[in-house]
Image: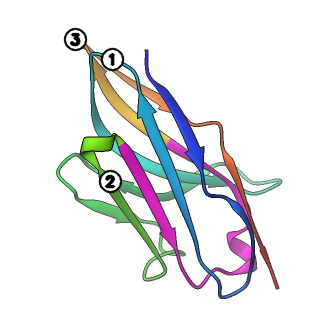
Amino acid sequence: QVQLVESGGGLVQAGGSLRLSCAASGSDFSINAMGWYRQAPGNQRGLVATITSGGSTNYADSVKDRFTISRDNAKNTVYLQMNSLKPEDTAVYYCNVEFTYYSGSFGIWGQGTQVTVSS
């Protein structure tokens, strides 16, 4: 069984920075893709950024050149460095991890962490 623990959210002024972390724990699993998604009130959950096991990244247009996704495979952890934050970045941020457990492939969501950007 795999569990995710997110951290790093909070309140920041526009133009500031935050770093989110999401650590996966468990046994007998290998992680494939990892990603961050966000959901603002009244909106659907949407993609922020993803990173493959080989390190290839993909970003939503709205965060390109401001956010950076990275991973530490030794720690089973994915990070999201968020710079030049804007009020419209305010949302609950969720990490998502795709993993292989024995012969099956699965996906799991983190509990979510609130990011609030004040103007």
Amino acid found under the numbered disc labelled 1: Ser
Graded by Cα atoms within 10 Å as few (under 14), some (14 to 19) or many (20 or more), the crowding at tag 2 reads many
Residue 66 appears at what percent x and percent y? 49, 80
Q: Which residue is mark 3?
A: 103
Residue 102 appears at what percent x and percent y? 23, 11
In magenta segment, residue 118: no
The quarter of the displayed image where residue 11 is located: bottom right
Q: Which residues are magenta?
A: 77-95
Distance from Cα at disc 2 to Cα at disc 1: 19 Å
Name the residue rendered at 75%, 57% in the picture: 40
Residue sticking out furthest to the left: 54
Circle 3 SS class: loop
Labels 3, 1: front one: 1
Residue 10 appears at what percent x and percent y? 73, 62
Which sits in the foreground, 117 or 27?
27
Amino acid found under the numbered disc labelled 2: Arg
Q: Which residue is mark 2?
A: 71
Amino acid found under the numbered disc labelled 3: Ser
The quarter of the displayed image where residue 8 is located: bottom right
Circle 2 SS class: strand
Name the residue rendered at 39%, 21% in the picture: 26
Distance from Cα at disc 2 to Cα at disc 3: 24 Å
Picture layout, residue 12 above or below residue 26:
below
Q: Are marks 2 and 1 in contact (CB under 8 Å)?
A: no
Graded by Cα atoms within 10 Å as few (under 14), some (14 to 19) or many (20 or more), the crowding at tag 3 reads few
Work out whether mark 3 precedes mark 1 in sequence or the reverse, and give the earlier one: 1
Distance from Cα at disc 3 to Cα at disc 1: 14 Å
Circle 1 SS class: loop
Name the residue rendered at 63%, 80% in the picture: 85
| Mark number, residue 27 | 1
